[in-house]
Image (tube, grey):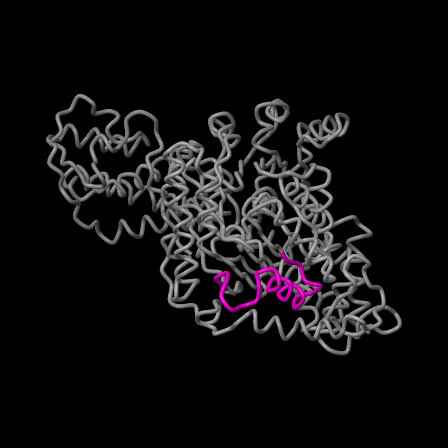
């Protein structure tokens, strides 16, 4: 987990420190007057150079010498320490004054990075400490509300920035728990936290999850009836809701009006890369978010799973963020096993291979991505004919039909969605065990986003890519009518993706290197390092499943012909609980039944990782159940009795 303190990008319109710095090299002041003027800018938080337009400046660049260790300690403290702690602030003030004095005599020591950092610290000190929280406040909410004992990498740093009143960019992989970084501040800060989210289905999932743990959350979007919308807006203005979700499109219309008079304390922008035209998924509606910080004068938290340096700079600029802390997580997800298989040759057809992969994972949730709408429909139909509960999803379907597919997948009524890239960004389903690409994605960023939908609960999952040069040619044809700049960028992106697929070394290592991260070979999380052949494994498992297909099953689902290789069921319809595998299946069935009663997705009750820990540890008391990761007080009161009854059998 890397922490840049702060994001070192110029944020002001008009003049900036680049008036006196060129590509990070310092231009030496020619007089004491200019040095004093820039020193004043460290006091005021103004951009260096804004007050020295009339001063003659030498054009000869001077490379800065290394600053003393004190500067590194100050920089680290600004990134990690609590800005509300009076002792911390006093230390910053003392060190800042030291560097002001040093700047007067040795300005050549100060790079653009140093100037920007010191300016950000001055701004933080001028802003005041804000509300002071105890050091364990975020951890207490994590334990008492969410039922987890420790943060994932980067979460606590982002949360402390938000509750300390500081802007922050969080670049964390899918499954790293980005939503927790605004949910915990929402409880601590009071007032209302505004979350801008791209898809309606994601809002609904999040609100369901928050209601289940006791956090007051709602959403405002176009699906609401007028009376319900009015009721939610009244509750918002009365301070009832701790979290409100809205789409960027809504800010131009009714949502923007609804926020008038609301006590907004934090703004969180999810999928923030969509605001940048340099990104792989630019959405013009995100440009509606410009000016939010000026309007509400609160910290802004920008979250994304994929952002290059260029995209990150654009996010900061477009959102008007003020010297934000940047927390960049590792892009390496060791629970995802990556495989890439070139189409053609002597192997089985792609369609047959996908069937074998799905049969070997029957009863598990999976997503299969295809390039065309027609391919999604034909693949889903083929899988259904072979006994797999699969449905197609693409942008050409009616909204009601798409929502039906999403709901059935969320509720575990079907196992597989066969989709174009229109599917996935709004899905918060934690128990997707595999992602298959029937066709190669158009970019590495897109590929990373899509495989990131597997294993969000931290459990092992497979990501299998089928690819060929014909996929590259298809994307080239699709891009022919675009403007030259976009066509060139798309052609470059798809060729980068092909090169990644063809890579003969560690796949995880090569993937994260695209995002500027360096890791050792993974050892076991890709087919190159592990030596696993997922097709060979799947052929064997699929043959076993086929042999069991005619077995008499109790409580089979009519859409998929049963649970494939699941343990045999006794007369009460529940798997045997004597062994860990059988207990895990029984817990899943109980979860599904309880979720249906509350009209929730099954994974909102408990995710697979929590059930797996229950099956392994077999807690027998409420206290023991509370020690399971993911079990908090609210969920204990809702579901504890039913799960303990089963665990005690």
Is residue 116 placed above or below 535 in the rendered structure?
above
Q: Residue at x 69, y 46 (%)?
A: 406
Instruction: Determine which quarter of the picture holds residue 368.
Output: bottom right
Horizontal arrangement in the rendering, residue 381 relative to residue 557 (left or right): left
* Quadrant of the snapshot with the C terminus: bottom right
Is residue 406 placed above or below 143 in the rendered structure?
above
Magenta stretch, residue numbers = 339-366
Tell me, yes or no, whether the highlighted magenta stretch contains residue 17. Answer: no
Q: Residue at x 62, y 65 (%)?
A: 357
The percent position of residue 616, horizontal first and vertical second, equals 67, 73
Please name whichever residue, 528 or 317, is drawn nearer the observer in this view of the structure: 528
Horizontal arrangement in the rendering, residue 117 relative to residue 224 (left or right): left
Horizontal arrangement in the rendering, residue 90 relative to residue 223 (left or right): left
* Quadrant of the snapshot with the N terminus: bottom left
Q: How many marks?
A: 0
Instruction: Determine which quarter of the picture holds residue 422.
Output: top right
Instruction: Determine which quarter of the picture holds residue 22.
Output: top left
The percent position of residue 242, horizontal first and vertical second, equals 64, 38
The percent position of residue 412, horizontal first and vertical second, equals 73, 55
The percent position of residue 458, horizontal first and vertical second, equals 57, 62
Q: Looking at the image, which residue sits at the far bottom? A: 578
Q: Looking at the image, which residue sits at the far right? A: 571
Please name whichever residue, 129 or 148, is drawn nearer the observer in this view of the structure: 148
């Amino acid at each position: 987990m890397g922490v840049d303190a702060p994001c070192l990008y110029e944020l002001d319109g008009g003049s900036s420190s680049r008036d006196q710095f060129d590509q990070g090299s310092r231009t030496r002041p020619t007089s004491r007057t200019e040095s004093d003027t820039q020193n004043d800018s460290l006091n005021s938080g103004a951009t260096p150079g804004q007050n020295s337009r009339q001063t003659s400046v030498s054009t000869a660049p001077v490379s800065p010498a290394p600053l003393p260790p004190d500067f590194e300690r100050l920089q680290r403290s600004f990134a990690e320490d609590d800005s509300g702690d009076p002792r911390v602030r006093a230390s910053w003030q003392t060190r800042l004054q030291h560097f002001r004095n040093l700047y007067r005599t040795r300005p050549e020591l100060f790079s653009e990075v140093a100037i920007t950092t010191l300016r950000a610290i001055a701004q933080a000190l001028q802003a005041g400490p804000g509300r002071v929280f105890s050091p364990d406040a975020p951890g207490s909410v994590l334990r008492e509300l969410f039922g987890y004992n420790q943060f994932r990498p980067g979460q606590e740093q982002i949360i402390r920035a938000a509750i300390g009143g500081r802007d922050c960019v969080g670049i964390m992989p899918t499954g790293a728990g980005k939503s927790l970084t605004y949910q915990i501040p929402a409880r601590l800060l009071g007032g209302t936290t505004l979350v801008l989210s791209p898809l309606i289905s994601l809002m609904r999932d999040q609100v369901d999850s928050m209601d289940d743990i006791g956090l007051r959350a709602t959403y405002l979007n176009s699906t609401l009836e007028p009376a319900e919308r009015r009721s939610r807006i009244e509750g918002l203005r009365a301070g009832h809701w701790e979290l409100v979700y809205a789409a960027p499109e809504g800010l131009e219309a009714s949502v923007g009006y609804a926020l008038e008079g609301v006590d907004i304390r934090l703004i969180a922008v999810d999928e923030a890369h969509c605001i940048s035209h340099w990104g792989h998924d630019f959405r013009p509606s995100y440009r509606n978010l410009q000016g939010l910080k000026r309007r509400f004068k609160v910290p802004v938290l920008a979250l994304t799973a994929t952002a290059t340096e260029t995209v990150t700079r654009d996010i900061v600029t477009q959102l008007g963020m003020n010297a934000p802390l940047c927390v960049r997580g590792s892009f390496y997800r060791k629970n995802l096993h990556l495989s890439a298989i070139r189409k053609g040759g002597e192997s089985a057809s792609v369609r047959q291979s996908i069937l074998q992969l799905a049969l070997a994972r029957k009863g598990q949730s999976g997503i299969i991505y295809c390039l065309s709408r027609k391919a999604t429909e034909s693949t889903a139909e083929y899988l259904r004919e072979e006994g797999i509960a699969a449905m197609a999803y693409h942008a050409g379907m009616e909204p009601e039909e798409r929502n039906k597919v999403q709901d059935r997948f969320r509720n575990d009524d079907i196992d597989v969605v066969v989709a174009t890239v229109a599917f996935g960004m709004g899905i918060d389903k934690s128990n997707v065990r595999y992602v298959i690409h029937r066709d190669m994605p158009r970019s590495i960023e897109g590929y990373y986003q899509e495989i990131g939908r597997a294993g969000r609960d931290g459990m092992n999952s497979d990501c299998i890519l089928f690819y060929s040069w014909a996929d590259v040619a298809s994307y080239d044809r699709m891009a022919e009518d675009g403007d030259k700049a976009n066509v060139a960028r798309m052609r470059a992106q798809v060729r980068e993706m092909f090169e990644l697929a063809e890579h003969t070394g560690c796949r995880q290592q090569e993937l994260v290197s695209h995002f500027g991260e360096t890791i050792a070979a993974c050892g076991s999380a890709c087919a190159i390092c592990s030596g696993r052949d997922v097709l060979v494994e799947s052929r064997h498992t699929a043959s076993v499943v086929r042999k069991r297909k005619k077995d008499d099953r109790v409580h089979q689902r009519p859409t998929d012909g049963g649970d494939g290789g699941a343990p045999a069921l006794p007369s009460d319809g529940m798997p045997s609980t004597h062994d860990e595998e059988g207990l895990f299946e029984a817990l899943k069935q109980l979860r599904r039944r309880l979720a249906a009663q509350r009209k929730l997705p099954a994974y909102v009750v408990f995710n697979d990782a929590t059930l797996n820990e229950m099956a392994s540890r077999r807690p027998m008391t409420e206290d023991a159940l509370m020690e399971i990761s993911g079990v908090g007080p609210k969920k204990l009161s809702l579901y504890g009795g039913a799960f303990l009854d089963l665990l005690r059998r």
